[in-house]
Every structure is written in C-alpha cells, then in structure tokens.
C-alpha cells in the first residue's frame, strides 16, 4: 500500500509567514508485488511442459559367430550408400564385385533426396504401403480401433514380404544425411532397416561413381 506522510507547514513552531503547500512523501509497499511474483512463478513452473529428449530407433545387425554358415542372398533387400556432397547411391540384392551365377556385377544408381527418394521408397515398399492404407481406411470406418490398427501396421512392416534396407556410409558422408534417410523410411512406413559398415569393394565402386 502507498502511504502519504505530511511534512511540517509554514506555521510550525508558531512562526508567521506566507502559507506554503504541505510537503507529502510517498512510500510504496512492495510486499504484495513480491507475493504476486512468486504466485506467477509457481503457476508457470507447474503448468509448463519441459522439452523431452527425442530419440530415433536404429537397428544394428549383430555379427554372426565364427564358423556360422553364410547368410542367404539378400533377394528382397536394397542397400543405400552415402557419400560426400549429399549424394546417395543404391543397389538391389547381393553385392557382386564381378559377374556371378549369370548375373552382372553390381552397378550403383544415384537418387536425390526429396521427391525422387520418396518415390523410390514408396515403389519398393508398395505392398506394405497398400496394406497400411487399407488398415487406415478400416480405422476411419470404425471397423477396427486404434490399438488394433497400430498392431496390424507393425505386423505389416515386419512381415517377410516387407523389403529390407541397409544403410552404409563412407568417411566422407555427413551424419545429417543418415538422419534424413531414416526419416524418409519412417514416412514411407518402412520398418525393416539397419545401419552397418561399408565394404572396401563398395567404397571402390562408390569412388568410381562419384568421379564421373
């Protein structure tokens, strides 16, 4: 509260003279303001939502134990190779440095981030994408609930018919490209992918492709 204090007038101590205006001093009590500040601080602390750390799930394949049989050919698999200048190359199936079993040696195809990459992933994942769209339609029509839809979508992404993607990068690639590629996988409903080390033969083929 503000208080007003009156000073002595011109007639103090019995002296005569011209009439002067009374002097007034103001004192502001800041106690209510401090209480209000603490109340506001408490309100914002209790109602604010603190930022949560964002994580991204990445699958790293476990190396096979020594003496284990050679894994089967990567028939339904596709490999992406990341390198400098935001360039991405890919190939399908097993990597063949030289022609093998009547099949030509592996050749790399370049794809650009954005619409081209999105179209490629949707084309390779078309069967799973159509299944998930059908599940979404059933959910909108109230034929299935949300929990059932999520379960069916996860099963579709992990089905044997779903394509498998492998991401590899040389020492010239940047981390941002890896994150962007995984984001595209999530957008295109791709659930089977892994990040692994690049082979020397793949590096040599990548160097040939970037030198052109």
Image (cartoon, rainbow, N blue to C red):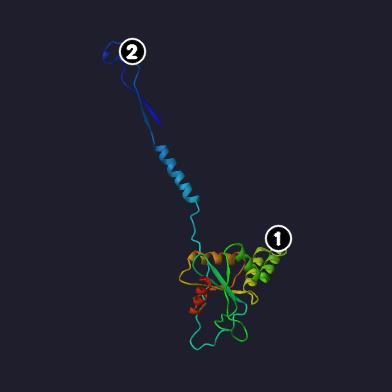
Residue 188 location (% of width, % of height): 62, 66
- Give the class, few, some or many, for how many residues have Cα within 10 Å of label 2's Cα (few <14, many ≥20): few
152 on left or right of 85: right
Q: Compared with residue 175, is residue 201 higher up or lower down, i.e. above or below?
A: below
The residue beneath circle 2 is: 19
Residue 14 location (% of width, % of height): 27, 13
Q: Secondary structure at mark 1?
A: helix
> Is 52 in front, or is 56?
56
**Mark whose residue sits in front, 2 or 1:** 1
- Residue found at x 49% / y 85%: 65
| Image quadrant where residue 128 sits | bottom right
Q: How many marks?
A: 2
- Residue found at x 67% / y 70%: 126
Q: Quadrant of the N terminus?
A: top left
- Residue found at x 57% / y 72%: 90
> Is 22 in front, or is 116?
116
Could you tell me if the residues under marks 2 and 1 are in contact, i.e. CB atoms within 8 Å? no
> Is 57 in front, or is 190?
190
Q: Residue furthest front?
A: 212
Residue 122 location (% of width, % of height): 64, 67
Of the residues under marks 2 and 1, which one precedes in the sequence? 2
- Give the class, few, some or many, for how many residues have Cα within 10 Å of label 1's Cα (few <14, many ≥20): few
> Is 14 in front, or is 133?
133
Q: Which mark is residue 156?
A: none
Residue 195 location (% of width, % of height): 52, 73
The residue beneath circle 1 is: 140
- How far apart are labels 2 and 1 at the CA level? 87 Å
153 on left or right of 27: right
Q: Secondary structure at mark 2?
A: loop
């Amino acid at each position: 509260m503000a208080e007003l204090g009156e000073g002595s007038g011109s007639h103090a101590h019995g002296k005569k003279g011209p009439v002067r205006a009374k002097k007034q001093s103001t004192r502001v009590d800041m106690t209510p303001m401090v209480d209000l500040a603490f109340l506001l601080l408490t309100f914002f602390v209790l109602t604010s939502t603190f930022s949560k750390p964002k994580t991204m799930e990445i699958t790293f394949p476990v190396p096979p134990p020594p003496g284990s049989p050679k894994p089967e050919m990567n028939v339904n698999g596709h490999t992406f190779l990341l390198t400098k200048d935001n360039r991405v190359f890919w190939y399908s199936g097993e990597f063949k440095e030289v022609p093998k079993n009547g099949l030509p040696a592996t050749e790399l195809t370049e794809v650009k981030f954005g619409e081209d990459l999105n179209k490629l992933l949707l084309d390779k994942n078309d069967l799973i994408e159509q299944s998930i769209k059908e599940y979404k339609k059933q959910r909108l029509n109230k034929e299935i609930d949300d929990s059932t839809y999520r379960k069916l979508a996860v099963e579709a992404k992990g089905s044997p018919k779903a394509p498998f993607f492998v991401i590899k990068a040389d020492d010239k690639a940047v981390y941002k490209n890896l994150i962007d590629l995984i984001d595209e996988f999530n957008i295109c409903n791709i659930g089977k992918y892994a990040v692994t080390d690049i082979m020397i033969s793949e590096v040599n083929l990548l160097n040939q492709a970037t030198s052109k």
